[in-house]
Image (cartoon, rainbow, N blue to C red):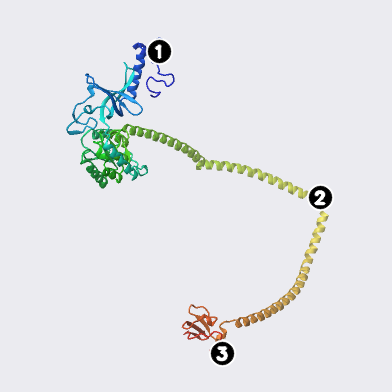
Amino acid sequence: MCGDEAGYDGKDGWETSFAEDASAGGVTPEGILTVRALTERLRRTLETRYPFVWVRGEVSNLSRPASGHVYFSLKDAEAQLQCVWFRSRQREAHTFDPLTGEVFDGPRPSPLEALANGLELLCAGRVSVYAPRGQYQLVVELVQPAGAGLLAQAFEERKRRLAAAGYFAQERKRDLPWNPRRVALITSPHGAAIHDFLELAAARGCASEIRLFPVPVQGPRAAPEIVAALREANSQGWAEVIVLIRGGGSLEDLWAFNEPPVADAIFRSGLPVLAGIGHEVDVSLADLTADRRAATPSHAAQLLWPLRAELLQRVDDLEMELARALAQRLEREEHALRLLERGLAWASPARRLERLGERLGQLSAALMWATRRLLQEWARVLDDVERRRRAAFTEGDLRGLALRLEMLGAALPRLLSQRFAGAGASLAGLEERLSRAASDLLTSRAATVEKLELRLAARDPLAPLQRGYALLYRKNGALARSVTDFAPGDELRARLADGALSARVEGVTPGAEKGNRP
């Protein structure tokens, strides 16, 4: 039990609902529970917590009283569970599977007929409390044989082989598409599995298309047709995901989904495969090989599509987020607009003219003040100069200075004439000296140039050609400097004073004496 279940506080035991139990006569004034009240609370809690469960175990203590009810225990190596199968929940021979809704060709025997001690069963029902004995029990609704035996051994052997081949490896499994728009459904067109799947599909997702590939889901024809349907769904390339479902049943009923060809077709499928075979306790090789396993066909629909209400809620959330984002954006834009308006007002022509007018007024006032200060300073300086002049020179001094100035003006032409005459004589001497120096320099430079020309002519590589010599070039254009640069048969080019010629080497004689002709 969990602490948040009805009636349990998780600390001091069962939380007492005094109003209810007091009215039922189950609580004393001191708040102490009666046995009946406590048992009733346990029963309600168990039935609420476990309204429908599947339990697997071995039958023991089987009892069939005259009332028609069946009492037995389910046990394993460590525990046992009391079970009651009321007569109203028992079924005689039937022609359909109550779990899957499949219709059989003939009546099937009821599990009640095969019920015996030592038989391994799968029982489904609700957990309750039998008050007279104060014990909890399973009120059985459905019973199925567990299917142990040769089929179970064959299943385990195939499971080991496929696991070793990597069919169940998690790293090869792909994610299912979220809210797929096109689904290939492989199942029987009859029965509760397709009905449950389509009913949930109609209430979830966003108008998806489902293409049915009808196949039998049990019997000798089931496995080959399931393989063919998987291949056909892949070859069409229309679907985003393949869904393979079937309702619950015994191991024999589900055996088609344990055939290796079915597992191999799922393994080689190019599309993701979602398998929902049987109930949660039913595990087939198809479930283990598929990219994702669903506990039931209904669970397969839940894995594929979210609730439409959740999508609508998500749309509402996105709409509110969009509204908030829009409001924030508008607020930011409005703030930016106000800043731009203030900036525009500050930078507008009228405001600029106003500021320029203010600045012009300030500069005009400063200019007037500076002009007055300058005029005052100049007047002060002129007054000071005039005062100093008057203090330094009298009228007699001024007349003497004027007379001296007149005498200097008369002597100035004579002095200038003498000065220019002496400068002319000096200039003539300098000109003569410059002419002699230039002539000597030119003579020296001419002699130097003549020597350089002679040296250059002596180093001219083409000069010997005038005396009968020749320059030999190899085939690659390089100048030959030794007889070792040639071999018999090599082509060469000889340059003479009046032209060039091509030749071929007939022989090479290294070490020939100087002056000897070859």
Q: Of the residues tagged 2 and 1, which is closer to the observer?
A: 1
Q: Residue at x 62, y 42 (%)?
A: 365
Can I make out residue 335 in this image?
Answer: yes
Quarter occupied by residue 182: top left
Q: Position of residue 25 (x, y in %)?
A: 35, 10
Query: Is the residue 206 above or below the residue 498 in the image?
Result: above
**In the image, 357: left or right of 308?**
right
Residue 85 in view, yes or no: no
| Above-or-below relation of 29 to 385 | above
Mark 2 Cα within 10 Å, few/some/many (few <14, many 20+)?
few
Q: What's the amino acid at mark 3? A: Asn
Residue linked to disc 3: 516
Which label sits in the foreground, 2 or 3? 3
Q: Position of residue 359 (x, y in %)?
A: 58, 42
Report how far apart the C-alphas of labels 2 and 3 lie in the structure. Answer: 114 Å
Amino acid found under the numbered disc labelled 2: Ala
Q: Secondary structure at mark 2?
A: helix
